[in-house]
Image: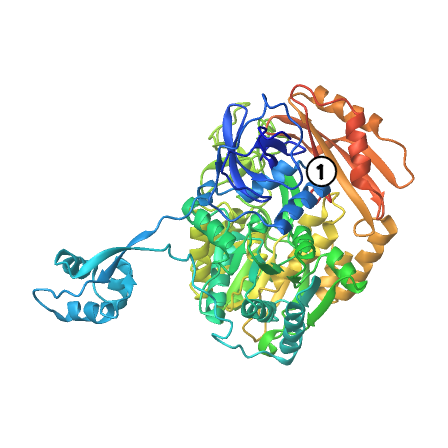
Amino acid sequence: MSKDSPRTVPVLVPTPVDRPFSYAVPEGAEVRPGSIVRVPIGPREVAAVVWDGAGENVDARRLRPISEVFDCPPLGEAARRFVDWVAAYTMTSPGMVARMFLRAPAAFEPEPPQPGLRYSGGEPERVTAARSRVLELARNGMAWTRSGLAHAAGVSLSVVDGLVAQDVFETVLLPPQPVVAKPDPDYAQPELTVDQEEAAGSLRERVRESAFSVTMIDGVTGSGKTETYFEAIGEAIRAGKQVLILMPEIALTQAFLERFHDRFGAKPAEWHSDVTPRMRERVWRQVAQGNVQVVAGARSSLFLPFDNLGLIVVDEEHDTAYKQEDRVFYNARDMAVVRGNIGQFPVILASATPSVETRVNAETGRYHSVALPTRYAEAVLPELKAIDMRRHPPARGGFLSPVLIQALRGALERGEQSLLFLNRRGYAPLTLCRVCGHRFQCPDCSSWLVEHRFRGQLVCHHCGHHEARPEACPECGTFDHLVACGPGIERIAEEAMEHFSDARIIVLSSDLVGGVKRLRLEFEAIAKGEADIVIGTQLVAKGHNFPGITVVGVVDADIGLANGDPRAAERTFQLLSQVTGRAGRAGGRSQGLIQTYQPDHPVMQALISGDAESFYQREIAERQRAAMPPFGRLAAIVVSAATRGEAEAHARALRRAAAPSDQISVLGPAEAPLALIAGRYRFRLLVHGTRRAGMQDYLRIMLEAAPRPRGSVRVQVDIDPQSFL
């Protein structure tokens, strides 16, 4: 490089590109790997990250300079290695993975100072009791915010404003307030059971080792897994480390935040889609600076720029909500383990129903394991019974067995709460005309429209299309002959109201009007005993503590078994175990009643007997026999296009490009079960390989050998797929 040539650096831009681009460093600017910068790309400018290595040789006439170097902590080496690893594993461009670290652009500039007040030494013309309290606090020379001083003195803002008007205070600038207070690991020491203390001791030791490890907490519902891993968090806080707690559901966070506050005297910072943009920016900045020590968040919080991350806890690690299936396809649980390995710190996976993959890793010694086999305070697990719907069918037009109705009535008479579970939103999954047979289908998807009677809408749960429920059939014009087929939770609520007209009934679903805020209020009402019967979808199965619930009824236990998903049995077992585990958490007798047409199915037998171990061993043996994960590897290739012909033609071209292999087989292409989503036709290929097969290398060669997608054709690769629709 000549003396006149500018210094160049590689910059990773947040676009679907496979490598960094070279940019010139402006004279006098200081950049290093990880620096966050603003660069021109095409006609626009974007935030990007200076990457490792040397910049490629670019003609000086084509070289463009970095526009701005942000006054922001750089992305650390571990985070950059994590980006490269995730990109290589998921077969996504590194730029799109880096983009997930750059989702709060306003945070790249320092937070502005805020105005404050400091006692100037003057005295007001008239001293009142309220003014005396303010002055007593202010005379120590500390600077206060206006609202903080008023709150601390127990006065209104007008009292402080009156003193400001009389020049009793001078205006000063204060550093930005922390988004959350520092947690205190010794704030409230819990009383742990013998089992909890033994498990907590093991977790604390892993944290003290400051090395990579993965520990599975396998504890029955209500056993105190949260209190146990809180002890590991406390140990990390003492060591000055940052902690990330991953949670599968936004609605879970409020009760969790309160439990965290009770233990550590402060709440963790939140990171999920319901956090306001301004708060997300502040959290991002303060995480990067190391001022936020604990974050509780959804899967995207894994891509926060932690300054000194020392522990990740994945709560409800089995939950499918950890799988992202948009742009970058990744499983946050698995990527949390990768981030722990790169950063050399421990990872904790907690669940009452661990995934088969986690169980196998624990049994083979790759992961440590701690067990909590009993409920806290000697509370007993619910007594589980199967209701054979062939012998105890519901009344005509109903969906609740007389056996379940009698159990609900008994709980009401005793003043106890009940929970009815059905994993189906809305009123009915299908609406049809009894005269001509017309079925209401989404115009853009190969799925039926779901009736939501509370809203008077027919809704597609895949693309969001919705329309008003008509009074007459649009096909034959007949009035009053539209019939709802099958139940959703709104229909179960209607049936419950018919049987128990005086009961206080709450319906919980992710599509409630009012969103997350409404859900949190409903959860609080249930916990306070302000509901008699709760009716909900899988939302109610995720870690909630409803102490008053003594009866849980599963309306349709067979619903999850009726598909071709190789994980169907595992997911049904996990979901039903979790939802029946909501009963009896405060102690005393409780029961779970499971309505099924297949009482002899191995999943139902394992649930009723309480023999989770035999279920896992059977499921593990079947996976091993079929070389399915974790004993084999899967990848899905989804080809979509604006026309069916385009999608099928490209899918077949991909299949022809697949090279013969002793370790990898390619199945398909076949039309996807959901063949049309949002106006795009879909074909799927499933790639199955041995555990040691080089899946990504094989797929790269296959994709390079195939024709490039043209026109409307898109190709998505999903390593370790969770959905087969």
**Residue 205 x %, y %:** 66, 72
**Residue 195 x %, y %:** 66, 77
**Residue 27 x %, y %:** 50, 34
Toward the left, the furthest residue is: 125
The N terminus, quarter of image = top right
- The residue nearer to you, when weighing 373 against 257, is 257
Give the side of residue 321 with respect to residue 604, left or right.
left
- The residue nearer to you, when weighing 186 against 681, is 186
Toward the right, the furthest residue is: 662
Crowd band around label 1 with a 10 angstrom C-alpha radius: few (<14), some (14–19), many (20+) = many
Q: Is residue 580 above or below residue 60?
A: below
The C terminus, quarter of image = top right
Can residue 142 be seen?
yes
Give the side of residue 627 with respect to residue 478, left or right.
right
Q: Residue 649 lies in what quarter of the image? A: top right
Q: Is residue 34 above or below residue 16?
A: below
Q: What residue type is disc 1 on? A: Met
**Residue 228 x %, y %:** 60, 71
Q: Is residue 557 above or below residue 644?
A: below
Give the side of residue 490 with respect to residue 403, left or right.
left
- The residue nearer to you, when weighing 448 against 680, is 680
Name the residue beneath numbered marker 1.
Answer: 91
Can residue 610 be seen?
no
